[in-house]
Image (cartoon, rainbow, N blue to C red):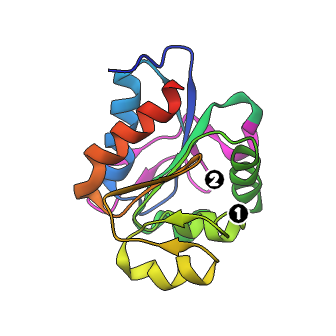
Amino acid sequence: MAELSGKRVAVLVEEGFEDLELWYPVLRLREAGATVEVIGTGSAPEYRGKYGLLSRPDKTIDQVQAKDYDGLVVPGGWAPDKLRRYSAVLAFVREIFAAQKPVGAICHAPWVLISAGVLKGRTATSVVAIKDDVENAGASWVDRPVVQDGNLITSRKPDDLPDFCRTLIAAFAR
């Protein structure tokens, strides 16, 4: 397994996150040695996932700077529809993306990338329900468990989490 000691990874959270898509990457990245911080919007002190798991963020988006992280993970569920409404979240995503740091997005999470304006010209996947959104944002959508296009790593659904996390860990280990 790749050693991620010294790497700092931000994971975004809001109400309605997909429980596995938040916690599985957080735990796998920590297991690989990364320091993982869950970053909320500040709309609440804690957020409940679709299936009831709670997440109490380590920090809020107004307390962080992209330069302090080696990359980003955006979980899916309904949270991305809320996350993309915050200009500070979108600026954070754009800065990390522009620095060519790994950005992982699974399920509905590409909605955040669409609103941040970073998908044009990329190849990506997502839950099929937002395929049209991804394509309308200028990306080529493909139906695969994980797609890596440069620093962008995308997956479709919870079943793809093993492939998604292996690819994330390899990208952060570079």
Q: For the residues marked 1 and 2, what is the alpha-carbon distance in whole angstroms? A: 7 Å
**Which mark is drawn over residue 147?**
none
Q: Quadrant of the N terminus?
A: top left
Report the side of 90 relative to 172 (left or right).
right
**Please, what is the three-letter code of the amino acid marked with disc 2?**
Thr
Query: Are the two marked residues, 1 and 2, in contact with CB atoms closer than 8 angstroms?
Result: yes
Residue designated by label 1: 86
For residue 48, which quarter of the picture? Answer: bottom left
For residue 120, which quarter of the picture? Answer: bottom right
Report the side of 156 relative to 57 (left or right).
left
Residue 153 shows in the view: yes
Taking the magenta stretch, the answer to whether it contains residue 60 is yes
Tell me where residue 172 appears, x and y as whole percent. 52, 30
For image coordinates 34% across by 37% down, the residue present is 166
- Depth check, front residue: 54 or 109: 109
Residue designated by label 2: 41
For the record, the magenta segment spans 39-66
Q: Quadrant of the C terminus?
A: top right
Q: Is residue 165 above or below residue 173?
A: below
First along the sequence among labels 1 and 2: 2
Tell me where residue 135 appears, x and y as whole percent. 55, 80
Q: Secondary structure at mark 2?
A: loop
Residue 36 shows in the view: no
For image coordinates 43% across by 32% down, the residue present is 170
For image coordinates 42% across by 68% down, the residue present is 126
**Please, what is the three-letter code of the amino acid marked with disc 1?**
Tyr
- Farthest left residue in view: 159
Tell me where residue 124 appears, x and y as whole percent. 49, 64
